[in-house]
Amino acid sequence: MSAIHLHNLVKKFGGFTALKTMDLMIEDGEFMALLGPSGCGKSTTMNMIAGMEDPTEGRILFGDRDMAGVPMGSRGVGFVFQNYAIFTNMTVRQNLAYGPKMHRRPQAEIDRRVGLIAELLQLTPMLDRRADRLSVNILQRVAIGRSAVMEPAIFLLDEPLSNVDAAFRAVMRTELKHLQRQFRQTMVYVTHDQLEAMTMADRIAVMDHGVLQQVGTPIEVYNNPANVFVAKFIGSPGMNLLPGRPAESDRGLVVDLGPLGATAPMPERLAGALRGHSGDVLLGFRPEQAVLAKDGRGIAAPISVVERIGARTIVHLGEGETTMKVVLDNDPHASFGASALVVPNMQAVRVFDRASGNAIGGAAHG
């Protein structure tokens, strides 16, 4: 079994706690992304799975097997680091064949494995080139192939695409997902890049300051962030968060945004929870889940910046705590200094307790 269970995992370095009581189940054959900013504990978690670090508390299980005391070389995992580590004096073929050769595999099996991995990673035309004559992009592809050729049941990748160019990252996202499906591996992928996590992972574990914030599919985490950190970290741009208070009106329960006015009535999934909430809240909505209007009801704010990015236009509005962004298709004819009304899709809004940062009420349906 190549399922991984992190059970009440804690890691301390002296007086510093890098990971705080993490409990996470990674299913057999699942592609799990550990996502978060630098210093959040994601690489520390991966190092413990690999056997490079021992937990201070808790257990790591591969299937039903406790990994306590099991060295890295006996865990049956493949590992790819941010900085590729290959033999530059060898050819691509020799690098790919190195692992199976050291494990004394039959030559026919080595040739089969090398040929398959080279084909999957588009390395076939380069098999007889020396590694020291290859670009950084191709070297990282060789590094991935050298671990993949061992066909490990568990494949760990720690920021493997950070040092390559943007176009190559886009190609490798597709190839890594194809590789994982081909071998039905359990893949754990550490990244600070939400695009990598959202496009490749079956589920995402969002981390911050050593704490697991939320686990879910990419669409679950995007639509229904568990707290303010996830709401702001996931999405490009992140979720708009406007301070306000629940209030009853002749239209039903609304969030009073002070000088910005009141929102439309809250959907039923939120209204009940908000009626019992007396404190300040943050009204959240994705920039993609709002439109601009010239008249009618909406959140009034001046336009401060207009970013035209190919097929998308990002309109920045307001100032201070009441800044917002709206993402629109093509050119909405918005201009700096003009007044606009932001109209969120109320069925997709989220509301957070301002004190704790935690989400209030039911899930949004976008």
Image (tube, helix red, strand yellow):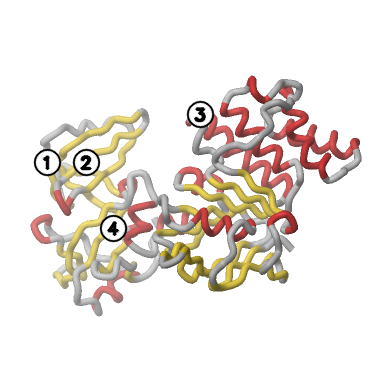
Residue that carries the numbered disc 2 in the rendered image: 316
Q: Residues within 10 Å of mark 1 (few under 14, many from 20)?
A: some
- Who comes first in sequence, dot 3 or dot 2? 3
Residue 55 picture quarter: bottom right
Mark 4 against mark 3, which lies toward the viewer?
Answer: 3
Residue that carries the numbered disc 3 in the rendered image: 167
Q: In the rendered image, which quarter contains the C terminus?
A: bottom left
**Residue closest to the far bottom:** 276
Residue 358 % position (x, y): 33, 68
Residue 320 % position (x, y): 15, 50
Specify the amino acid type for callout 1: Ser
- Who comes first in sequence, dot 1 or dot 3? 3
Residue 77 % position (x, y): 70, 53
Mark 4 against mark 1, which lies toward the viewer?
Answer: 4
Q: CA distance from mark 2 to mark 1?
A: 11 Å
Mark 1–mark 3 CB contact (< 8 Å)? no
| Foreground pick, 298 / 230 | 230
Specify the amino acid type for callout 2: His
Specify the amino acid type for callout 4: Gly
- Who comes first in sequence, dot 4 or dot 2? 4
- Who comes first in sequence, dot 4 or dot 1? 4
Mark 2 against mark 1, which lies toward the viewer?
Answer: 2
| Numbered disc 1: secondary structure | strand
Answer left or right for 170 relative to 1: left
Q: CA distance from mark 4 to mark 3?
A: 33 Å
Residue that carries the numbered disc 1 in the rendered image: 339
Q: Residues within 10 Å of mark 4 (few under 14, many from 20)?
A: many
